[in-house]
């Protein structure tokens, strides 16, 4: 849960900007979108597998560029 307390003489725009930054850091919107619709266990497994492959490909690419 994100709580933003207004500081002395803080403008509403700055307060909103701080709130949005905290929401992004907590990944609340990502979590909300993921739970917006029911995801079958098989779909969840496929999504996780795609994420794992993407992460491994990124690591391999970084290693190849580094010359290791």
Image: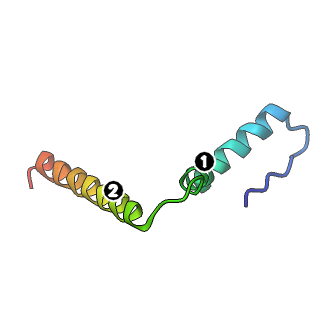
Residue drawn at x 57%, y 56% is 31
**Residue 47 spot, x, y in % from top left:** 36, 57
Which of these two is toward me, 63 or 20?
20
Residue drawn at x 78%, y 56% is 3
Disc number at residue 10? Answer: none
Residue 31 located left or right of residue 2: left
In the figure, 13 relative to 5: above or below?
above
Residue extending furthest toward the left: 67
Residue beneath label 1, please?
24
Disc number at residue 51? Answer: 2
Residue drawn at x 27%, y 52% is 54
Graded by Cα atoms within 10 Å as few (under 14), some (14 to 19) or many (20 or more), the crowding at tag 1 reads: few
Graded by Cα atoms within 10 Å as few (under 14), some (14 to 19) or many (20 or more), the crowding at tag 2 reads: few
In the figure, 15 relative to 58: above or below?
above
- Which quadrant is the N terminus positioned in? bottom right
- Which quadrant is the C terminus positioned in? bottom left
Splitting the image into 4 quarters, where does residue 42 fall?
bottom left
**Label 1 secondary element:** helix
The first of marks 2 and 1 along the sequence is: 1
**Label 2 secondary element:** helix
Q: CA distance from mark 2 to mark 1?
A: 20 Å
Which of these two is toward me, 29 or 39?
39
**Residue 30 spot, x, y in % from top left:** 55, 51
- Of circles 2 and 1, the one toward us is 2
Splitting the image into 4 quarters, where does residue 53 fall?
bottom left
Splitting the image into 4 quarters, where does residue 49 fall?
bottom left
């Amino acid at each position: 849960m994100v709580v933003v307390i207004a500081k002395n003489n803080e403008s509403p725009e700055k307060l909103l900007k701080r709130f949005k930054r905290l929401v992004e850091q907590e990944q609340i919107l990502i979590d909300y979108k993921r739970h917006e619709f029911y995801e079958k266990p098989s779909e969840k497994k496929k999504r996780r597998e795609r994420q794992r492959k993407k992460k491994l490909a990124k690591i391999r690419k970084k290693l190849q560029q580094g010359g290791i």
